[in-house]
Amino acid sequence: MYTVANILRWRRSLVPDNPAITDGGLHTSYRELDQASNRVANALISAGLNRGERVCVLDVCHLGVFEVIFGIAKAGGVFTPINWRLAPAEIAYVIKDAAASIVFVGGTIAPALAAAMVDCQEARVVTFSGSQKEAGWIDYTSFRDEGDTQDPHRDAQEDETVFQLYTSGTTGYPKGAELTNRGLCMGGTMCLSAFSPITESDATLICMPLYHIAGAGYAIGMIFCGTRLVLLGQADPGAILDLIEKERINLTFLVPALINFILQHPKCGETDFSSLKYIAYGASPIPEELLVASMRVFGCGFVQAYGLTETTGGVVLLPNQDHYPGNPRLKSCGLPIFGHTVRIVDPMGKPCAPGDVGEITINGGMVMKGYWNQPEANAQNIRNGWFYTGDAGYMDEDGYVYIHDRVKDMIISGGENIYPAEVESALFAHAEVVDVAVIGIPDKKWGETVKAVVVRAPGSRLSEAALIEFCRERLAHFKCPTSVDFTETLPRNPSGKLLKRVLREPYWEGQQRQVH
């Protein structure tokens, strides 16, 4: 049966003594991880966990969290990670929305949970070693070790929910996307094919947060492949460079913003990247210039994955063989994976012709069951079996998918549709631009006009006029910024996505609508 719990059981049967996880100075084999997760599963059942019940986890990436992930799966529960950067009120919202009866927490996040628990007093709290302990909270090691080592085999069915990941929540309250056992197992088979040849002796760096599909989904896929996971609690560019060299990392997943930060780090030019086989990337558009520079510096294979939390991660892949300088398909995110279909539709839901921009829709086994307790959102986003992504793009004659931008981020100026990602890519080609975001702001004449918010390279004196002129050499004039603001940093969420709502707010304050 295709279940997350069976992935670990399978790997234990094949390579019981192979290293499964390296977490700093801690090392565990597949046999040890399987046994520890059995204990967690039985402890959860003894604590009264019902099948299908949500269990929240609020912590950075470490070994104990993986014991809990597989323990929850074996007990028939639903792993529900919480963004550990949230404020107490936001944490309380997720716990209550998920109706979680048990919450695991660790480290410096414990005080935020303590504040959140004022509104969630019915949930029990288990704390990982070293975390703040409030009255009535249970120590994780004691909780785990009270469980029996026998596997309870109480897994959810293939098409039942096993993970509930909350969307980034860049606008409004986050929604819980229900991901199935089947979808996560299909993600594992996708990893096997995408990173071929991949072996059980390979080491993969897990540095994306586990409340993000690029963290949790990728990690499960790499366990499916039998690799050794090397864990990093937070995605620090210097620490990533150190671990690549020290642990001889073969594979990792990085978001474009993090790739950019790594290339700018002083250690980058001194790091030995010879162990790298593949870097997978995705979660946001990548400028072609950054991608080509990354290929040159890292000297390894690259695979782009396009997908969303709601599709259990990547369902469209640009394979390594398409990654070479000058290939026009570097602007593409690739072809749909086996078992999935992508269709581009117009606002009426009718398929678009090749080359015509519309909304990207996806059908296949990795698409979520739906949003937890959100019937209206489900009706809006899942229609006749197709998930409407909210991303604008097109297909070429060969079926390659090209992303323009989020539909909601599109700028309409004088009746022309302008996709910020295209403008951002053009601006990013300037040698003195380190980071850039493009937004639409109100304009009495044109309705909206294009503004760029730019982070300049250290010591740069790049001017607004020079940058606009640079852009006009590369794009139609109506797409180019009419103004540029310079800033030290751009607001991003922990997964690296630009928070354009934050950038837009000052310019749209007092407007009746957030679009003209």
Image (cartoon, rainbow, N blue to C red):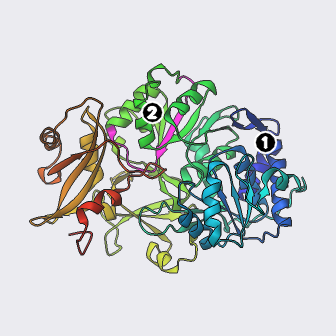
Residues 119 and 386: in front is: 119
Q: Is residue 390 above or below residue 396?
A: below
Q: Main secondary structure of the magenta part?
A: loop
Q: Position of residue 318 (x, y in %)?
A: 44, 44
Sequence-wise, the earlier of marks 1 and 2 is 1
Question: 433 above or below 391?
Answer: above
Q: Please state the extent of the stretch shown in magenta in the rendering.
A: 274-288
Which class describes the residues within 10 Å of circle 1: few (<14), some (14-19), or many (20+)?
many
Decide if residue 376 is on the left or right side of residue 52: left
Residue 281 covered by magenta stretch: yes
For mark 1, what is the residue?
Answer: 30
Horizontal side of residue 55 vs 287, given as left or right: right
Circle 2 SS class: helix
Dot 2 amino acid type? Ile
Q: CA distance from mark 1 to mark 2?
A: 31 Å
**Label 2: few (<14), some (14–19) or many (≥20) C-alpha neighbours in 10 Å:** many
Residue drawn at point x = 34 percent, y = 32 percent:
325
Residue 4: x and y in percent read 71, 56
Q: Which quarter of the figure has residue 502?
A: bottom left
> Residue 471: x and y, percent?
17, 42
Q: Which residue lies under the disc numbered 2? A: 262
Amino acid type assigned to the residue bearing label 1 in the image: Tyr
